[in-house]
Image (cartoon, coloured by chain):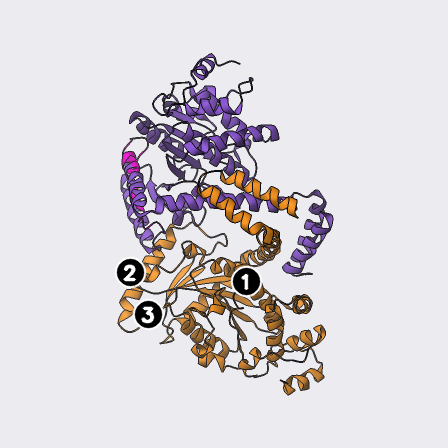
Chain colours: A purple, B orange
Amino acid sequence: MEHPENDKQYKGLTVNEGVQQMPAVNPYATFRRNKRTLSVQEYVDGIRRGDISILGQAVTLVESNLPSDQLVAQRVIEQCLPFAGHSIRVGITGVPGAGKSTFIEALGTELCQAGKHLAVLAIDPSSEKSKGSILGDKTRMNELATQANAFIRPSPSAGSLGGVARKTRETIVLCEAAGFDTILIETVGVGQSETAAHSMVDYFLLLQVTGTGDELQGIKRGIMEMADGIAINKCDGNNIDRARAARVSFKNALMLFPPAESGWTPEVICCSAIDHSGVQDVWNNIEQYIAFTQKNGYFDYHRTEQSKYWMYETINAALLNGFYQNEQMEELIKQTEQQVLNNEISSFIAAHNLLDAYNKKK
Amino acid sequence: MEHPENDKQYKGLTVNEGVQQMPAVNPYATFRRNKRTLSVQEYVDGIRRGDISILGQAVTLVESNLPSDQLVAQRVIEQCLPFAGHSIRVGITGVPGAGKSTFIEALGTELCQAGKHLAVLAIDPSSEKSKGSILGDKTRMNELATQANAFIRPSPSAGSLGGVARKTRETIVLCEAAGFDTILIETVGVGQSETAAHSMVDYFLLLQVTGTGDELQGIKRGIMEMADGIAINKCDGNNIDRARAARVSFKNALMLFPPAESGWTPEVICCSAIDHSGVQDVWNNIEQYIAFTQKNGYFDYHRTEQSKYWMYETINAALLNGFYQNEQMEELIKQTEQQVLNNEISSFIAAHNLLDAYNKKK
């Protein structure tokens, strides 16, 4: 499949600043793989001039597990790095049913109409199995998908969380180099994905719904303390009173938490994605947070820490995978774990036995 | 230095069930290192008959970093394992100033007087530097230290948190084999020690004090959601009203948290370690928790998970140490981290460069 407009654009060879000339390409086109292999330079040039189709292909490369694709992808990322970093990165989480898709559709449409260039990404290690997969059904974001300034990309398909999260983080670099100034990252709110998202965003938003304990069951413990802000969604119809009461409860609870490292006090905001009420308030809070942390230095400090985190996280994952993905170890690990469970050997002797065996086999 | 009473006891060679014949040895004696080297069997026999002096020496072996000591220590632990596990293990945390020592003194004295055999351990990786070291100044537990049934042991001296925590966990095994039926583990409440303690106890108690945000500053975010119970200490004098109000606030906040995996609803209890009021209520809550989780199966499930956790944690630490403690890597890691911070290379390329260098050097 050819993209004549790409070729035409490519001939121009002008590396623009990305944002201004963002072409109104149908975002659905980003999911088709261009059969013609582009060079690293062609990818980088395409991304830099905001060519959404080439950006989509580059993301596909990033998501590919083929070593040859990864080689190209890493070089593209490396060349995009100097142009990355100039966006606001926001993580959004909440249990299934909290209305994440509707909220992102409402917020995203407002942002696009205000002239922002918005990329919507996701981290959902379960996405291939399409069970509750987020952003998988793009028809849920009909309105946003038609915005010229929006780039919507589902989660990389299933794999280890670390792998999926890494790909999303690399996609951020490409999107930023393509001129997107606002990145929303959606997670499912039920697992480790939140920690991963938290480690790559500037602001972490928890979307809650009103009601008793039942609605909260899906949220992993600890996520509330990660949040830079809480939005009580579905504050509409005959739910308004309950939503407002929930807001007070959450606000009181947050006051018992120790102050965040950023110095920021999280706000609790009622909104209705359906009525579009309060959605702008949530965004205003995000912008206030950015201004606040840019002023006190936390914004840059936090990003630096995140870069270091990802370097060490990648190293650690590789070191551990060498052990756990060693086929010769598999059976021995299983047996030794059973010895520990039977209280035959201590956890520590078990570990040392396994490490001895590993070092001999290497 | 000789311990004639040990030699006399040892000659008895009777392996009793430990608890009944716990000798009233001065606990201070446990910190002197017996120069005579005992055999593995002598250590095990001494521990099994509840000889506090030999237990103390065995703990010193566990804490030693000498490979020859570790060899003996691991064999002692292995032989003690079949007799371990029969205790209630409670973690206690709180910021400096929350009155942890006074609380443990009050609770511990009550438990000893009720016939419990109590071991008090600590996890404090900073302990060698004696900055805010817990249990380091044993004079803070004057009353408890004179109880015949109490064994008080400061934190293993400074080292990596993983190392310090591992030693504490191994010490639990020895204490249980010696017949101690109640283990309290104190942590400082300001760092990762809580996660480590949480992964080796049955019940995790957060000690809070009343007041505004200031008093809460020291507690790491996320610890509140780890707690199986919260005790508001210093509910005495003209502080009673504030303590009771704080109790209501914490109770409301806990209601917003998702239910714990154990099915248990954490309680918030006011107490005063100085007045000895409410301390028994805290203990009753712990016993209710134990009964509740033993009935629903969580107690055993949780301990099994903890054993697995420590096996994998030990493996992971060893795999990572091979990389990070490799002297040839040190300078390269520093340089590469700087490249990431300068935005010259991505976190992922940095990681791969370092791993390549490591694999070549190995």
**Residue under disc 2 on the same chain as residue under disc 1:** yes
Q: Nearer the viewer, mark 3 or mark 2?
A: 2
Residue A191 seen in the current view: no
Compared to residue B161, the image places residue B278 above or below, namely below
Q: Amino acid at mark 3?
A: Cys
Mark 3 or mark 1, earlier in chain: 1
Q: Looking at the image, tell me whether mark 3 or mark 2 is earlier in sequence order.
A: 2
Q: Residues within 10 Å of mark 3 (few under 14, many from 20)?
A: many
Residue at mark 2: B212
Q: Which is in the foreground here, disc 3 or disc 1? A: 1
Look at discs 2 and 1 and give the one toward the viewer: 1
Q: Quadrant of residue B354?
A: top right
Q: Residue at x 45, y 17 (%)?
A: A10
Q: Identify the residue position indicated by label 1 in the image.
A: B165
Within the magenta stretch, is there residue A265? Answer: yes
Q: Chain of mark 1?
A: B
The chain that hosts pointer 3 is: B
Please name the residue that numbered disc 3 is placed on: B235
User: Which region shows up in magenta?
Assistant: A262-283
Nearest the viewer among B215 and A130 is: B215
